[in-house]
Amino acid sequence: MKAICRMAAAGLLLALLAGCSAGQSSYEWAVEPRLQADKIEPLAVSGGGILEGSLPKDEALLDLCAAQQGKLWGLVDGRTGEWVVEPRFSQRPTLCPDGHLLATGPDGALLSDPALDRQLAAYDPELQTEPGHGGLGVEYVWDAESAQVRRHSWNESGAQSPVLEPEESGELLPVRKGVWEYNELEGAQVMKAQQKGLYAAATADGKLLTDFVYEQARPGSGGLIAVEKKGKWGYLNGQGELVIPCKYDGVWSQSTDRDMQGNDSAVWQRIWPAPCLEAGVVVRKGGEYALLSSEGKTLIGFGSYQALAPAPDGLVWAKQGNLWGLLRPVSAS
């Protein structure tokens, strides 16, 4: 009987320890939950073709996150948890591919607001509201004949789908098979992606990491690239290995007035996967959230918090008691 009790106690201890390693106890609050918001999402690129839903290249802009409170949106600082712009936008604010803020007023029209521009200059002197400026729509295509990645932009005159130089992008790229066709605007042959073609992952120097088997893929970040299969998202590493299986739902939504091929369309919306940041990858399944490492290890288990969202500088947004705060991992010491 005593032996059975000892075994039960040991099993309970192991279960508790396992729960600690997979759950929230290895994290602490860098900023206590105090921000009242319904939703927090990355401030990301919109209307840029394959760049749709990606993060800005400027590290200063990574500090800014979009936050919804009721029917309005604002901007919050992903390091301090404070409002940068109180909720005033009627739609989710985004960035055009050139880094300008696309934000809407109460009437739904894009804002051009010098006062707001001065407020945002603390994060990036070039950041400004500019209605109607969408930047370049970009897609990456695979030139099978030369075994190279080419960049096609439908808003850039004279581009003619140049071969992508490795230094142009240090991240993993989503590519589709390319086809040459004559473009009257360019006055030249350009290479465009095959319509409704499947995606593969590649490096900028022309190394194809996978076959063309994915329904969708997003530009890589943090050494991982998100890929979609049968409507579920997973992540590939730099060797093309599926380190996080395709079984998760998208985490955050983006709207655009262009479809994936860059054609004008009615408002079109997708639920995108979260980027891989220093803290890891936020995933969602069955309405619950978890945080995984870039190797697929569970860092914060499903159901530990009401919601999780990506944040910069090794932090992660967490919602508890309907308030948002910022978590950081407890140091090994």
Image: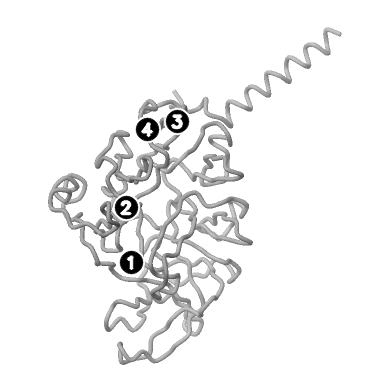
Q: What is the spatial separation of the Cα atoms under label 1 and label 2, in whole angstroms?
A: 27 Å
- Quadrant, the C terminus: top left
**Which labelled disc corresponds to residue 322?**
3
Instruction: Residue at 83% x, 11% y: name it.
Output: 3
Decide if residue 136 is on the left or right side of residue 222. Answer: left
The amino acid type, in three-letter code, at marker 3 is Asn
Q: Pinpoint residue 78: horizontal percent, then vertical percent.
A: 33, 39
Q: Pinpoint residue 160: horizontal percent, then vertical percent.
A: 33, 84
Instruction: Residue at 54% x, 68% y: name it.
Output: 200
Q: What is the spatial separation of the Cα atoms under label 2 and label 4, in whole angstroms?
A: 18 Å
Between disc 1 and disc 4, whose residue precedes?
4
Q: Element under label 1? A: helix
For discs 1 and 3, the disc positioned in front in the rendered view:
3
The amino acid type, in three-letter code, at marker 2 is Pro
**Which labelled disc corresponds to residue 141?**
none
Number of numbered discs: 4
The answer to whether mark 3 and mark 4 are in CB contact below 8 A is: yes
Q: Which residue is mark 4?
A: 36
Q: Which residue is mark 1?
A: 168
Between disc 3 and disc 4, whose residue precedes?
4
Q: Pinpoint residue 326: horizontal percent, then vertical percent.
A: 39, 32
Q: Is residue 23 above or below residue 60?
A: above
Dot 1 alpha-carbon crowd within 10 angstroms: few under 14, some 14 to 19, many 20 or more: few
Q: What is the spatial separation of the Cα atoms under label 3 and label 2, in whole angstroms?
A: 22 Å
Between disc 1 and disc 2, whose residue precedes?
2
Q: Element under label 4? A: loop
Q: What is the spatial separation of the Cα atoms under label 1 and label 4, in whole angstroms?
A: 39 Å
Q: Pinpoint residue 221: horizontal percent, then vertical percent.
A: 42, 54
